[in-house]
């Protein structure tokens, strides 16, 4: 029972850590950044990326400090479920004087993005300094016209297969009465299937271009599915023990005795 409680506490702490650290803050960044794809401002909106076509990225950096800043490169990266599925660094040095704004335009070639991602993905455009520190960033959602067999698509398919195996294993153990008599242990047996269902739902919504896998979406979906899995395992019926096996090589014979009736007469 102590192990069950420890596992529950560990799960709660991990979930709390994700909730508190899922969205990094950019308040201390010295540069204010705005970006445009092919001349369209896409900050806070959805930008369509076709790997077959290069994208003209316009970056405007505003220096909020009292000292000039040196920009080394511009980085574009797509992240889902705390995993980076694509990242492009383009060396593009320029200086931003104190209290001024500088606009630069560069052309990005996303030709190999078709094999890396598909669907809606949270994307960050970062302006990187000479020490490789992030001077400023802007968040947006990119709609990638990639392949289902890209890294992100294959990741979703692998999650689907593992989740199906987790459900099959748990349900087969239930059908064979192999689950633990302890309700909490049965709940933990169904937990991986619940978590996997939540992850599959997040990736599927993203690939179908319905909802991007942002922390405000993916965390409630995964935690909700995990809770449902725990409840299903907790509410499963108590396993019924099977009949005791009769030893085949036992030479003894079973005998049933009863008390004779007092009115029984001798037959003589």
Image: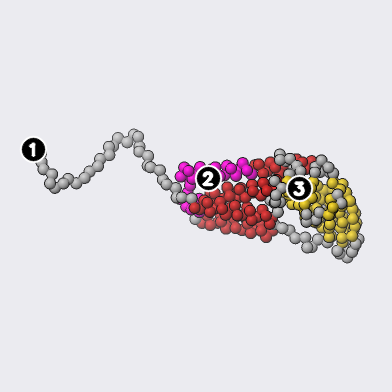
Ranked by sequence position, the earlier of labels 1 and 2 is 2
Instruction: Count residues near mark 2 (Cα–Cα under 10 Å), then give few for <14, some for 14-19, many for 20+.
Output: some
The residue at 89%/64% (across/down) is: 99
108 up-or-down from 136: above or below: above
Snapshot quadrant of residue 136 = bottom right
Q: Which comes sooner in the sequence, label 2 or label 3?
A: 3
Residue 57, visible in the rendered structure: no
- For this orientation, the residue located farthest to the bottom is 66
Q: CA distance from mark 2 to mark 3?
A: 36 Å
Residue linked to disc 2: 170
Query: Is there a contact, CB below 8 Å, between mark 1 and mark 3?
Result: no
Question: Spatial distance from mark 1 to mark 3, Cα to Cα?
Answer: 103 Å
Q: Position of residue 134 (x, y in %)?
A: 81, 56
Near-viewer residue (186 or 7): 186
Task: Indicate whether residue 179 is drawn in magenta.
Answer: yes
Q: Secondary structure at mark 1?
A: loop
The residue at the point 61 percent across, 48 percent down is: 197
Q: Residue 4 placed where, x, y %?
A: 52, 54
The residue indicated by pointer 3 is 143
In space, the residues marked 1 and 2 are separated at their CA atoms by: 67 Å
Q: Magenta residues?
A: 159-186
Residue 20 in the image: above or below residue 186: below
> Which color scheme does this rendered protein use?
secondary structure
N-terminal-most mark, 1 or 3: 3
- Number of the front mark, 2 or 3: 3
Kindly state the secondary structure of the residue where label 2 is placed: helix
From this viewpoint, which residue is outermost toward the left? 268
> Could you tell me which quadrant the C terminus lies in?
top left
Q: Which residue is mark 1?
A: 268
List x then y, in percent, for residue 74. Answer: 84, 51
């Amino acid at each position: 029972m102590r192990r069950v409680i420890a596992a529950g506490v560990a799960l709660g702490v991990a979930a709390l850590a994700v909730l508190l650290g899922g969205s990094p803050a950019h308040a201390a960044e010295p540069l204010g950044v705005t970006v445009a794809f092919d001349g369209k401002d896409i900050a806070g909106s959805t930008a369509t990326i076709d790997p077959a076509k290069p994208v003209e990225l316009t970056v405007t950096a505003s220096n909020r400090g009292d000292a000039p800043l040196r920009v080394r490169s511009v980085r574009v990266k797509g992240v889902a479920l705390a995993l980076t599925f694509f990242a492009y660094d383009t060396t593009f040095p320029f200086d931003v004087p104190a209290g001024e704004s500088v606009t630069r335009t560069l052309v990005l070639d996303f030709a190999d993005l078709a094999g890396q991602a598909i669907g809606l993905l949270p994307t960050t455009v970062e302006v990187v300094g000479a020490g490789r520190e992030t001077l400023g960033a802007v968040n947006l959602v990119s709609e990638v016209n990639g392949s289902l067999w890209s890294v992100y698509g294959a990741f979703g398919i692998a999650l689907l297969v593992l989740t199906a195996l987790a459900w099959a294993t748990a349900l087969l153990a239930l059908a064979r009465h192999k689950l633990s008599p302890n309700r909490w242990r049965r709940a933990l047996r169904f937990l991986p299937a619940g978590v996997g269902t939540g992850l599959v739902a997040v990736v599927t919504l993203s690939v179908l271009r319905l909802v991007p896998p942002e922390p405000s979406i993916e965390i409630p979906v995964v935690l909700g599915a995990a809770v449902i899995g725990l409840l299903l395992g907790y509410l499963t019926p108590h396993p019924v023990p099977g009949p005791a096996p009769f030893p085949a090589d036992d030479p003894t014979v079973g005998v049933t005795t009863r008390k004779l009736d007092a009115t029984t007469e001798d037959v003589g």
